[in-house]
Image: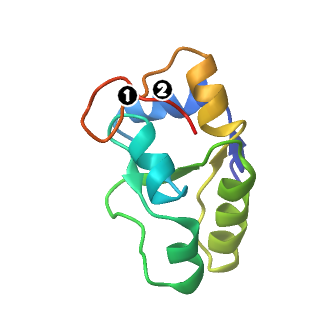
Amino acid sequence: MPDSRITPARAHRLLRHGTAVLVDVRETDEFAAGHAPGAVHLPLSGLADGSASLPAGRDPVLICRSGNRSRRAAELLAARGVYAPDVIGGMRDWAALGLPVEDARGAAGTVL
């Protein structure tokens, strides 16, 4: 099985190459304050209760603020037979590497 956890730099490369979609599992206010451009917002609660589904067409990569919720989401999806690695260190490490973060309006965002 491929790596279940990947670095922010590797996730960014996958996104740039169009082979993956970044799925942000944080809460709405966190996502609105700052997320990776092009990320899809699916809160962990929606994945857990089945009310949200992953986008089709590209491999999902999961991210949250620090890596805890995305790790739980990856485990939940793995139990359903879906492979979705999570980003080590989450959006905090993503931003610390200088990778792009935007808010809900497309301006420079912050990680809550």
Q: Amino acid at mark 2?
A: Arg
Give residue 34's position: percent from left, percent from top. 44, 36
Image coords of residue 13 (percent x, y):
48, 26
Residue, disc 1: 16
Q: Is 35 situated above or below 69?
A: above
Quadrant (top left/top right/bottom left/bottom right) for the C terminus: top right
Q: Position of residue 60 (x, y in %)?
A: 48, 54
**Label total for image:** 2
The percent coordinates of residue 9 (x first, y second) are: 58, 24
Question: Are the residues at dot 1 and dot 2 in contact (C-beta closer than 8 Å)?
Answer: yes
Q: Amino acid at mark 1?
A: Arg
Residue sitting at 35 percent across and 34 percent down? 37
Q: Residue at x 50, y 48 (%)?
A: 30
**Which residue: 68% across, 49% down?**
2
Residue 20 quadrant = top left
Looking at the rendered image, the quarter that the N terminus falls into is: bottom right
* Residue annotated with mark 2: 13
